[in-house]
Image (cartoon, rainbow, N blue to C red):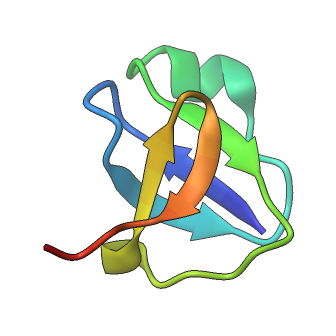
Amino acid sequence: MWYIFNEEGNCICTADHEPNKEDLATRSEIAIESNDVYALDEVILKDGVVQKKVME
């Protein structure tokens, strides 16, 4: 699973194939691949690693 994050580190979508990194860069977005599967509202990018959000 590929997770796509905006420049604030918020996950904005997922993909089952590798996204076009040049296209993402035009919007200051990045894609990170992970074997873990999370819903959009429960994922966070921390230190370059896709992790499940800790709900407070």
41 vs 45: above or below: below
Q: Is residue 13 left or right of residue 30?
A: left
The residue at the point 48 percent across, 44 percent down is 45
* Quarter placement of the N terminus: bottom right
Q: Position of residue 41 (x, y in %)?
A: 31, 77
Q: Is residue 22 left or right of residue 55?
A: right
Q: Is residue 53 left or right of residue 16?
A: left
Q: Position of residue 3 (x, y in %)?
A: 61, 56
Location of residue 53 (image quadrant): bottom left
The residue at the point 70 percent across, 43 percent down is 32
Q: Position of residue 24 (x, y in %)?
A: 55, 28
- The count of marks equals 0
**Residue at the far front in the pictured view:** 56
User: In front here: 37 or 25?
Assistant: 37
The residue at the point 37 percent across, 57 percent down is 12
The residue at the point 54 percent across, 16 percent down is 25
* Quarter placement of the C terminus: bottom left
Location of residue 48 (image quadrant): top right
